[in-house]
Amino acid sequence: MSDANVLLLGESGFGKTHYGTQLLLRLRGKECELSFREPPTNISPFDAAITHLNKGKTATHTSSGVYVESRWPLKDTQGRQFDLIWPDYAGEQLTHITTRRFVTPEWRHRICESSGWALMLRLRKLNVPKDTFVKPLANLAPSSSPKTLQKISDQARLIELLQILLYTRRTGNLLPITTPQLTILLSCWDEIEGLEPDVRPAMVLASRLPLVYSFIESNWKPSSRVIFGLSALEKELNNKQADEGYIDKGPAAFGYVIAPNGTRSDDLTLPIRYLVERPA
Amino acid sequence: MSACANVECHPDRGCDLGENELQNCPNWRAAAKTRVSSDLQNPQQREVEGAVLPWSGNAFGTEALSFVASRSNPITIAVVGPYNSGKTTLLAAWYLLVTRGIFPSGSKFSGSYTLGGWENISHRLQWSEHAGPTFPAHTPVGGRNAGMLHLAFRREADGVLRDYILIDAPGEWYRRWSIAEDQPNAEGARWIAANADLFLVLADSDSLTGEERGETRQTLQHILDRLGSVLEGRPLALVWTKADKHPKPEIQKAVRDAALLASNSLREFEVSVFPKADEELVSRRFLDVLGWAFNQPRRRVQPTPIAIQRSEALGIYGRSFGCE
């Protein structure tokens, strides 16, 4: 039996806690590709979030200093067993890696120990700024305005993060990468506007964040990367107005993923199965 | 982490404002009182505790170039031209195209260790002698580092990853070098002339049309003459920038003749950010130059080895190996 150590990468507000919570609730049942082979010894990191969802409200923001790992004893439909190590933390920690350009010893350890990376991207929060994306090149006319420090664009920040993680892990990219495997989760899929029916998540990433898409496509072997759409909650909740459906049916009745081929499934464990079962 | 007043600056990897001496940087001086134990004073300690990155994200100086040079032999592209000839606009236009997912055909973007530098030039596009934050190249007279921007692309056909270093340096460097090759303050241009794999010489059509056209022509002729004397068969392209303007035929001919004298396999391109109405044409013209530059062979003789500053940089990107 091997451990599957997932490095979950998501900036603040990208839905890490909601996905972790919904994943935990799915794993309790028997309908998904992955399930608990015995009850996990400790679900306290997700206890508050489970309570909130059962009340039809959103989970609260994870405190910034927090990084907790849960060990979940799992089995798949063929009876294979492994432990999934699943983290929860405040996304600011990830942002600090790129802004401070320093990987703490704790993060260095996590990066090195991980067998697969799950990168959550919430497209509504990631913009290609108008001034560098749709601005006609004609607007490049020289300016005499004094030089001011600009915030790095979202695409550049995400690529820099991946470059830093690869460097920390001593993973080169002269040849396309096989390990760590990379699963991209386009989170809050339900809030992305203008999606064609059955669109493949990879195409959505390619059109919304072309530079990030090219970076991933170029550097990871096709068999070592996969792009899912993810709607962990299926609809927008808030922390004031309770959602009656969540109260009546329970949070496990909600949430879906969009598989790489564009098909929808209620099995939120699919992206994880992909991460842990693919050959290294 | 940073001992600088600007939290986004990483002085151990180079001053964000481009100062060679940290003491000259106002942000660094501002933090002097609070800087009790600087990270710089104890870099080994930081490395033991965590991972310090060998690239700053801003434009490279020659020393940091070793980081990229250690994984592959980068192709170095020198963008050469007099002051205000459109060098930075050319580079910025390329970056904007790349962020849109528009690359030379048959290649995929594989990364850049100077993303901060690219972002900076694409936000503000004119070089000045007043030194942009990311380009030590624009330190005033006497500065020795060229601004080097990095891009990596993977060829789809064979999967080979190639690193490209695009060198931007103040036009003044080239002017001085063209007048007297061996003078001490032409060192920057000499280094570029000796080490670049190929050259793009920019002819400013606007300037060649205006009142100063005679002087601009002369500067270009001098630069091309000088370059021709050291080219040794390396590829050279003449890029007419601001090509919505049309210099008189005799002026064009004089510049072209100088370029042909420098290289008998000269390529010519025209770029302009106008017309606004035909964005596709505008983009394609910029892309054509980049595509040509990317497909040139590396020079036969390798440049003088660059001293590797950090043993850690060696081999890390050469292959995959786990974390011991």
Image (cartoon, helix red, strand yellow):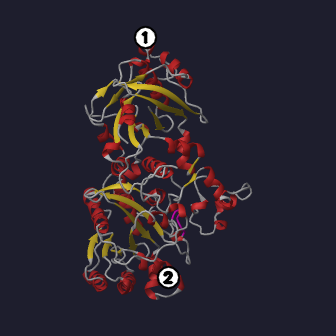
Depth check, front residue: A272 or B230: A272
Quarter occupied by residue B319: bottom left
Look at the magenta stretch and give its main secondary structure: loop
| A16 lies above or below B72 | above
Residue B149 x/y as whole percent = 44, 64
Residue B58 x/y as whole percent = 50, 60
- Between the residue at mark 1 and the residue at mark 2, the CA separation in whole angstroms equals 77 Å
Looking at the image, how many numbered discs can be counted on the residues? 2
- State which region is magenta: B130-134
Question: In the structure shown, which secondary structural element does the residue marked by tag 1 occupy?
Answer: helix
Q: Which mark is residue A146?
A: none
Q: Residues within 10 Å of mark 1 (few under 14, many from 20)?
A: few
Check disc 1 and report the residue beneath it: A248
Determine whether, in the image, residue B279 is placed left or right of residue B89.
left
Q: Amino acid at mark 1?
A: Asp
Residue A37 x/y as whole percent = 44, 21
Q: Which mark is residue B186?
A: 2
